[in-house]
């Protein structure tokens, strides 16, 4: 079997029995049954990780499991590890399209000249490098981003899903609180409880000097550092957004 159990007689119904899940997780069937029944038992982060692997949970399902148990997923990057891989940051300069790297709170860690030329008010010299702060508080953001309300609402839903495992970390909580106080739109979107995976697809901008620009956005997560994101916007007019 794909999960690692020895083959046996043909089953009448698909899926694993409780006893088999318990065996895969290295716990007693009784203890696992109590977990399924929602009894107040103590489950360590390692035990939850084994359950997530045994049940082949998706990333979102795994995050939800740890959130319900109020445990930190041991597969999560160490929040104390602040340094992004040097190779990742250096690669941004090699990309011939607007590109930038975001950290856990969606602060831009590195960006190239094309991104700086595109995002006036965010990556062109502004002091605040946070994508959410730019979207909701920068004076020119609503005119730059086409269909701003739809994109802003989607951005908040993506951030909620992305940050669900560290909502109580001090930097994340401080960002949410400050944005809720500074922007009625952010407070309204955050209160809606919407969640969504960060998606690619078309992104349109009304650039102050180049007019309407259309890109296809691609987001990558580096191996072993899923708290970071490399975002690339493909399709820019090279003459309009010059490189160094």
Image (tube, rainbow, N blue to C red):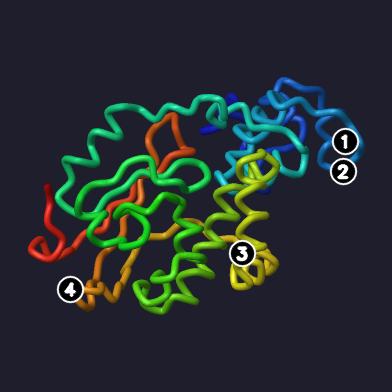
Mark-to-mark CA distance, 1 and 2: 5 Å
* Residue occupied by mark 1: 34
Q: Quadrant of residue 156?
A: bottom right
Q: Secondary structure at mark 3?
A: helix
Q: Secondary structure at mark 2?
A: helix
Where is residue 18 drawn, in percent x and y? 76, 35
Do the numbered discs 4 and 3 sit on residues whose CB atoms are within 8 Å?
A: no
> Outermost residue toward the left?
239
Do the numbered discs 1 and 2 sit on residues whose CB atoms are within 8 Å?
A: yes
Do the numbered discs 3 and 2 sit on residues whose CB atoms are within 8 Å?
A: no
In the image, residue 35 sits, relative to residue 239, either above or below, namely: above
Query: How crowded is the residue under tag 4: few (<14 C-alpha within 10 Å), some, or many (20+)?
Result: few
Q: Nearer the viewer, mark 4 or mark 3?
A: 3
Mark-to-mark CA distance, 2 and 4: 59 Å
Between residue 69 and residue 177, name the one nearer to us. 177
Numbered label attached to residue 210? 4
Mark-to-mark CA distance, 1 and 3: 45 Å
Q: Secondary structure at mark 1?
A: helix
Between residue 134 and residue 42, name the one nearer to us. 134
User: Tag 3 or tag 4, which sits nearer the N-term?
Assistant: 3
In the image, residue 65 sits, relative to residue 22, either above or below, namely: below
* Residue occupied by mark 3: 182
User: Tag 2 or tag 3, which sits nearer the N-term?
Assistant: 2
Q: Quadrant of the N terminus?
A: top right
Q: Quadrant of residue 134?
A: bottom left
Q: Secondary structure at mark 4?
A: loop
* Residue occupied by mark 2: 37
| Residue 165 placement, left or right of 18 | left
Query: How crowded is the residue under tag 2: few (<14 C-alpha within 10 Å), some, or many (20+)?
Result: few
Mark-to-mark CA distance, 4 and 1: 61 Å
Do the numbered discs 2 and 4 sit on residues whose CB atoms are within 8 Å?
A: no
């Amino acid at each position: 079997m794909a999960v690692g159990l020895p083959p046996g007689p043909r089953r009448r119904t698909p899926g694993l029995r409780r006893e088999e899940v318990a065996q895969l997780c290295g716990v007693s069937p009784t203890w696992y049954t109590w977990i399924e029944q929602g009894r107040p038992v103590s489950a360590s982060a390692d035990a939850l990780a084994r359950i997530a692997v045994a049940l082949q949970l998706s990333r979102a399902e795994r995050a939800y499991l740890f959130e319900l148990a109020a445990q930190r997923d041991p597969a999560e990057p160490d929040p104390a590890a602040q340094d992004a891989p040097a190779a990742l940051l250096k690669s941004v300069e090699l990309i011939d399209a607007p590109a930038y790297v975001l950290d856990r709170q969606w602060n831009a860690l590195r960006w190239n000249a094309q991104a700086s030329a595109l995002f006036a008010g965010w990556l062109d010299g502004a002091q605040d490098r946070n994508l959410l702060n730019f979207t909701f508080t920068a004076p020119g953001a609503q005119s730059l981003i086409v269909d701003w309300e739809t994109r802003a609402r989607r951005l908040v839903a993506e951030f909620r899903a992305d940050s669900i495992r560290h909502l109580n970390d001090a930097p994340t909580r401080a960002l949410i609180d400050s944005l809720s106080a500074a922007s009625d739109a952010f407070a309204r979107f955050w209160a809606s409880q919407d969640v969504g995976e960060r998606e690619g697809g078309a992104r349109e901008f009304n650039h102050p000097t180049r007019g309407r620009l259309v890109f296809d956005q691609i987001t990558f997560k580096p191996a072993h550092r899923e708290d970071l994101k490399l975002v690339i916007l493909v399709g820019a007019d090279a003459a309009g957004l010059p490189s160094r």
